[in-house]
Image (cartoon, grey):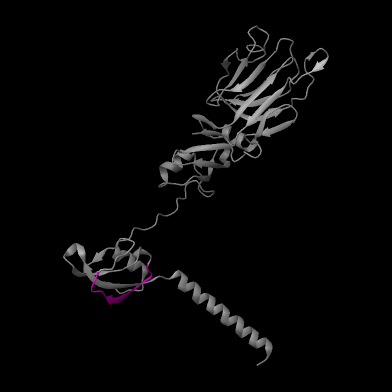
């Protein structure tokens, strides 16, 4: 036999062997035998001694046990027996529940109007990315949190990136909500919003220009707003910070006088907060020249953005 023929024969044999092994792996042969049923005065009854008989692809008549073995799983006894290699017949005889058919709602072929609709139409849908239909029949891939039925926007697992605490040198621009997400938020019909975050945020300025700016959308109007501490001779110890819920920006000052900008230039009054908002982008630039004492410079601008996730939930 020529060498190439032997090689071809060997390859064919290997392929046949792999196919046979795959079929054996996918198949589950089970035996149905008899043994005493302790719950029925040890009357002999039929049993398929596997953890999940509904996985059986073929059932054959097996052996007779004179004693019921101790097994690490529960079994069910039967008064009749089955001998079949038809899995559909086996599952019907065992009264197996059929696995749920994947729900088509929220797919690219059948987009939903909201995550709440998917929750209502589908049976126990998992969290994940679904397709939602907005104005002009435009689809948006949106992460839906189940079982709450919330659409989720923002970023998570950012602990290795969002780790700035009292930073006074690094200049950064962080996109929290992407432009595509902002379009989806404004286009899809949302009326209920909630912020979920573990981010600690603050910006402070002391007699200096501070270009650090928070870009946000007011909730629920989705009106665009930019918040910063502008240059002024009376902005000693003016500080911006999240409230406890993370959905408002507060203006704080350690000064007991009016030498701060809270309540002016669009900022909320001292110890008060803005309307509810979602932060979409932050720019921190703390390197401006600050106030001086005795011709010396001290640290006057700093910011903190430290945490692992910032999400807007909407429905």
- Residue at the top extreme, as displayed: 257
Q: Position of residue 35 (x, y in %)?
A: 24, 71
Q: Position of residue 290 (x, y in %)?
A: 77, 18
- Residue 52 falls left or right of residue 203: left
Q: Is residue 64 magenta?
A: yes
Q: Quadrant of residue 15?
A: bottom right
Q: Is residue 296 magenta?
A: no
On screen, 195 above or below 252?
Answer: below
- Residue 250 falls left or right of residue 27: right
Q: Nearer the viewer, residue 111 or 230?
A: 230
Q: Position of residue 184 (x, y in %)?
A: 58, 36
Q: Would you say residue 80 is visible in this rendering?
A: no
On screen, 15 above or below 204?
Answer: below
Q: How many marks?
A: 0
Q: Quadrant of residue 217?
A: top right
The segment highlighted magenta reads: 56-67
Q: Quadrant of the N terminus?
A: bottom right
- Residue at the bottom extreme, as displayed: 1
Q: Would you say residue 20 is visible in this rendering?
A: yes
Q: Position of residue 209 (x, y in %)?
A: 76, 18
- Residue 92 falls left or right of residue 252: left
On screen, 259 above or below 186?
Answer: above
């Amino acid at each position: 036999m020529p060498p190439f023929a032997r090689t071809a024969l060997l390859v064919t044999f290997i392929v046949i062997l792999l196919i046979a092994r795959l079929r054996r792996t996918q198949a589950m042969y089970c035996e149905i035998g008899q043994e005493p049923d302790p719950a029925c005065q040890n009357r002999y009854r039929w049993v398929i001694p596997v953890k999940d008989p509904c996985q059986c692809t073929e059932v054959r008549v097996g052996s007779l046990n004179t004693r019921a073995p101790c097994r690490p799983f529960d079994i069910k006894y039967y008064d009749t027996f089955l001998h079949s290699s038809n899995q559909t017949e086996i599952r019907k005889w065992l009264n197996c529940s059929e696995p749920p058919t994947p729900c088509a709602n929220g797919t690219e072929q059948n987009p939903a109007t909201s995550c709440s609709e998917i929750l209502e139409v589908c049976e126990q849908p998992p969290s994940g990315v679904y397709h939602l239909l907005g104005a002009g029949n435009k689809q948006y891939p949106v992460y839906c949190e189940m079982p709450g039925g919330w659409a989720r926007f923002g970023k998570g697992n950012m602990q290795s990136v969002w780790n700035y605490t009292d930073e006074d040198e690094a200049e950064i621009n962080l996109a929290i909500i992407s432009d595509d997400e902002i379009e989806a938020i404004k286009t899809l019909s949302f009326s209920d919003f909630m912020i979920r975050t573990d981010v600690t945020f603050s910006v402070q300025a002391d007699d200096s220009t501070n270009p650090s700016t928070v870009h946000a959308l007011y909730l629920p109007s989705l009106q665009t707003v930019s918040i910063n501490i502008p240059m002024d001779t009376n902005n000693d110890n003016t500080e911006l910070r999240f409230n406890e819920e993370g959905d408002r920006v507060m203006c704080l000052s350690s000064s007991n006088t009016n030498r701060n900008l809270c309540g002016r230039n669009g900022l909320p009054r001292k110890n008060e907060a803005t309307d509810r908002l979602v932060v979409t982008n932050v720019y921190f630039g703390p390197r401006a020249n600050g106030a001086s004492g005795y011709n010396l410079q001290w640290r006057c601008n700093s910011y903190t953005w430290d945490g692992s996730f910032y999400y807007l939930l909407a429905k």
